[in-house]
Amino acid sequence: MIARYQALRQRIAQELEQLERTVSAIQRHWEKARLSGPDQDAYINSVALNLHSFYTGVERVLQLIAVEVDGGVLGGPSWHAELLRQMTVDVPAVRPPVLRTQTVQELDEYRKFRHLIRNIYTTNIDPDRIGKLVAKLPNVYAQLHQDLEAFLAFLDTLARADEE
């Protein structure tokens, strides 16, 4: 058993569990925002923060893969967007694509939203934009989960490579 790949697999699996909890919190808080009337701002802010956390968790997984498998993360001012694109690339003799192009296109909207949340006041949050992201989130998370499960299977194969 190659411990490095087994450890990476476990770290990604733990992040997926946390992402699932975050997606659940987003959905619960969005529903409460819709029903809460005058107190909805607190729930909307919670949803915005959790959407921020969702993408941050996704990016943490992708950085782990970039560092542990690809050998490093790209730099520069657009490295966040480049990291997503890097995960669609088949790196011969290293790894298959981690994410499908469609998954990356969907995730890019959450990356852009996270950037927005980091740079505006909470009083400027657009509930309609949040609503669109929340509505798409179950499908986006399902795509992401499917892609990462396939990558975890690849890591299992790498972890057992010394047993052959």
Image (spheres, rainbow, N blue to C red):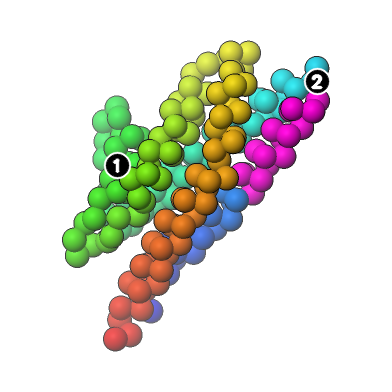
The image shows residue 62 at horizontal and vertical percentages of 39, 48
Q: Report the amino acid beneath label 1.
A: Arg
Residue at the left extreme? 92
Q: From the viewer's perspective, is residue 76 above or below residue 58? A: above
Q: Point out the image quarter for the C terminus.
A: bottom left
Camera-nearest residue between 86 and 163 = 86
Camera-nearest residue between 145 and 139 = 139
Q: Residue at x 30, y 48 (%)?
A: 88
Q: From the viewer's perspective, is residue 2 above or below residue 43? A: below
Residue that mark 1 sits on: 85
Q: Residues within 10 Å of mark 2 (few under 14, many from 20)?
A: few
Q: From the viewer's perspective, is residue 126 above or below residue 33? A: above
Q: Which residues are magenta?
A: 21-37
Q: Residue at x 42, y 56 (%)?
A: 147
The image shows residue 81 at horizontal and vertical percentages of 33, 34
Q: Report the amino acid beneath label 2.
A: Gly
The image shows residue 7 at horizontal and vertical percentages of 44, 66
The label nearer to you, 2 versus 1, is 2
Residue 88 lies left or right of residue 16; in this view the side is left
* SS type, badge 2: helix
**How far, Cα to Cα, is label 2 from label 1?**
40 Å
Q: Residue at x 69, y 33 (%)?
A: 30
* SS type, badge 1: helix
Residue 129 lies left or right of residue 38; in this view the side is left
Q: Residue at x 43, y 28 (%)?
A: 112
Residue that mark 2 sits on: 37
Q: Earlier in the sequence, mark 2 or mark 1?
A: 2
